Image (cartoon, rainbow, N blue to C red):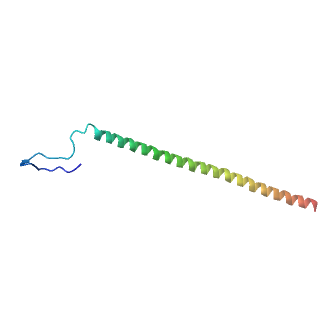
Amino acid sequence: MQAVRPLQIRGRGLELCPATDAAVFDAGSRSAQLQVAEVDRDIDLAQYEKAIQTACREVADALALRCTLDEEVAAQEFLVTATARRYTLSQARYE
């Protein structure tokens, strides 16, 4: 929208009414544009929230996997220690 001009000269006379370049009645165009902008904002917000939820889910999954892997590593280390002890005992028995 352009600025309102207080005086405008038309033809030979001087018009004292403010002149604007915007239509006074726009048949609801601005209201419709506002509604479109609000819907676009709501869509963007929903997509942003979904992205955050996805990121949180991925982090939770990664942490759960890490806990599982830590347990597996601990179990394997215990098995290695037990097997080494068994080997040592078996060697001592046959010597």
Q: Residue furthest left?
A: 13
The quadrant in which residue 76 appears is bottom right
- Quarter of the image with the C terminus in it: bottom right
Position of residue 68 in the picture relative to residue 47 (left or right):
right
**Which residue sits at x=8%, y=48%?**
11
Which is more toward the observer, 63 or 42? 42
The image shows residue 18 at horizontal and vertical percentages of: 13, 46
Residue at figure coordinates x 62%, y 49% from the top left: 64
Name the foreground residue: 12 vs 17.
12
* Residue furthest bottom as drawn: 95
Count of marks, rendered view? 0
Closest to the observer, 11 or 95: 11
67 left or right of 90? Answer: left
Q: Quadrant of residue 94?
A: bottom right
Against 85, residue 13 (above or below) is above
Taking the view exactly as shown, the residue that stands out farthest to the top is 27
Relative to 31, does residue 55 appear above or below in the rendering?
below
Q: Residue at x 20, y 47 (%)?
A: 21
Seen from the viewer's position, the closer of residues 54 and 11 is 11
Compared across the picture, whether 40 is left or right of 53 comes to: left
Q: Position of residue 10 (x, y in %)?
A: 10, 48
Residue 43 spot, x, y in % from top left: 42, 43
**Percent position (x, y) of residue 16?**
9, 47
Q: Report the residue that reaches farthest toward the right.
A: 95
Q: Residue at x 32, y 42 (%)?
A: 34
